[in-house]
Amino acid sequence: MTRWLTDDEMRAWLGYRRLRTLLDLQITRDLAADSGLSDADYDVLSTLGDAPAHRMRLGELAASIRWSVSRLSHHVSRMHQRGLVTRDDCETDGRGATVVLTDAGWATIQAAATRHVASVRRHFIDLLDPADLAALTTIAGKVLTHLDEVTPPDPRRGGARTQRDGTTAP
Amino acid sequence: MTRWLTDDEMRAWLGYRRLRTLLDLQITRDLAADSGLSDADYDVLSTLGDAPAHRMRLGELAASIRWSVSRLSHHVSRMHQRGLVTRDDCETDGRGATVVLTDAGWATIQAAATRHVASVRRHFIDLLDPADLAALTTIAGKVLTHLDEVTPPDPRRGGARTQRDGTTAP
DNA sequence: ACAACCTGCTTGACATGTCAAACAGACTAG
DNA sequence: CTAGTCTGTTTGACATGTCAAGCAGGTTGT
């Protein structure tokens, strides 16, 4: 027997869904208009910008922004065309690829970050009071804790991966 | 001068971002595994399922789930191949297209809805207490109110669309 | 040392989304 | 009525994401 959502629950769920859709849309639009970057570009560039020497192994970078390696590889190729990043051979592992920020990439992400923060403030953070922020952090914490149990973020470090039926992967 | 995010603000923002990424991923996975539907399929089917006579004008349907008309047209073609919906001529407007749920589509969405609600409860709603739900609704309300001011949902009803620079579209 | 097996990355085929152009059916002003 | 314009939808070219090979460089057991 199905437990449907109550009115309050439905309001919260639909609110979240619409928030997600429209807020992301707006911030994506701002990012494109202000800096000529997609969300994807921004994730890659900002993560590289925080990395030592502005370089990171492709696989690590992918894991840290939770992309598939394949997606990142394709995307790095495109960003390479635009002169934002470079591929470098890895010194310790012949198979490895290292993604490196170019000077242009670094300049781009610095300029973009400023405008992006402004956009996030304008459409989100500055609209909320401290209690809202705290509540949001709490909610995210609860849900993320649960999700980490259901699907460990990194199977290799987190122990055996648990399947939907409770068994363990071969 | 840029006002960067404080620690609390950053926690809330990153929490939201990760929540959005991982929760959506999980729910999408469940939906595909349980019912063989994508999020996109689900949005279309459930909206049609709620519509009178299970039919809706293509443009209205697109607006109600906030897709571009073009996207919906493509997607309806694909869903048509799968036998979930049909295209019908509109009686009052020769240009019009009406999207109609097939029997198979109706059966599919009914079965899917049950499992989808369970998934949403398991990974989200049931993890939160009433205060969390209320807070979430409040937050969504604040942000959505703001976004509606910035970009009216339907330019034709809401008055002139305001551009980023404050001018009005031609 | 070397065969068999991992691993990290790239690639190609395909699914899905976006944008602008093309269309055909309604309106509107003379 | 009819030319011009607007509107609702479709379409095609292209951007981006996913999945399953493919491949070269490591690693391991004997």
Image (cartoon, coloured by chain):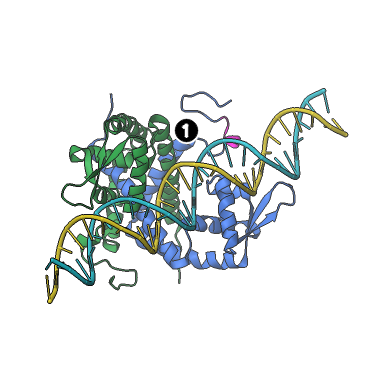
Chain colours: A blue, B green, C yellow, D cyan
Residue that numbered label 1 is attached to: A150
Residue at position x 69%, y 48% from top? Answer: A96
Graded by Cα atoms within 10 Å as few (under 14), some (14 to 19) or many (20 or more), the crowding at tag 1 reads some
Total marks drawn? 1
Quarter-wise, where is residue A88 in the image? bottom right
- Please name whichever residue, D5 or B169, is drawn nearer the observer in this view of the structure: D5
Quadrant placement of the C terminus of chain A = top right
Could you tell me residue A64's position as x and y percent?
56, 48
Residue at position x 59%, y 55% from top? Answer: A77
Residue B124 vertical position relative to residue C25 in the rendered view, above or below: above
Residue at position x 57%, y 46% from top? Answer: A70
- The reply to whether residue A39 is visible in this rendering is yes
Quadrant placement of the N terminus of chain A = top left
Regarding mark 1 in the picture, which secondary structure is present there?
helix
Is A87 situated left or right of B40 in this image? right
Quarter-wise, where is residue B6 in the image? bottom left
Please provide the residue range marked out in magenta. Answer: A155-160
- Please name whichever residue, B70 or A17, is drawn nearer the observer in this view of the structure: B70
User: Does the magenta stretch mainly form a helix, a strand or a loop?
Assistant: helix
Residue A40 vertical position relative to residue B99 in the rendered view, above or below: below
Amino acid at circle 1: Val
Give yes or no for residue A111 being in the magenta stretch: no
Could you tell me residue A59's position as x and y percent?
62, 46
- Please name whichever residue, B133 or B49, is drawn nearer the observer in this view of the structure: B49
Could you tell me residue C18's position as x and y percent?
40, 56
Is D18 situated left or right of B32 in this image? right
Could you tell me residue B158's position as x and y percent?
21, 62
Residue D19 vertical position relative to residue A101 in the rendered view, above or below: above
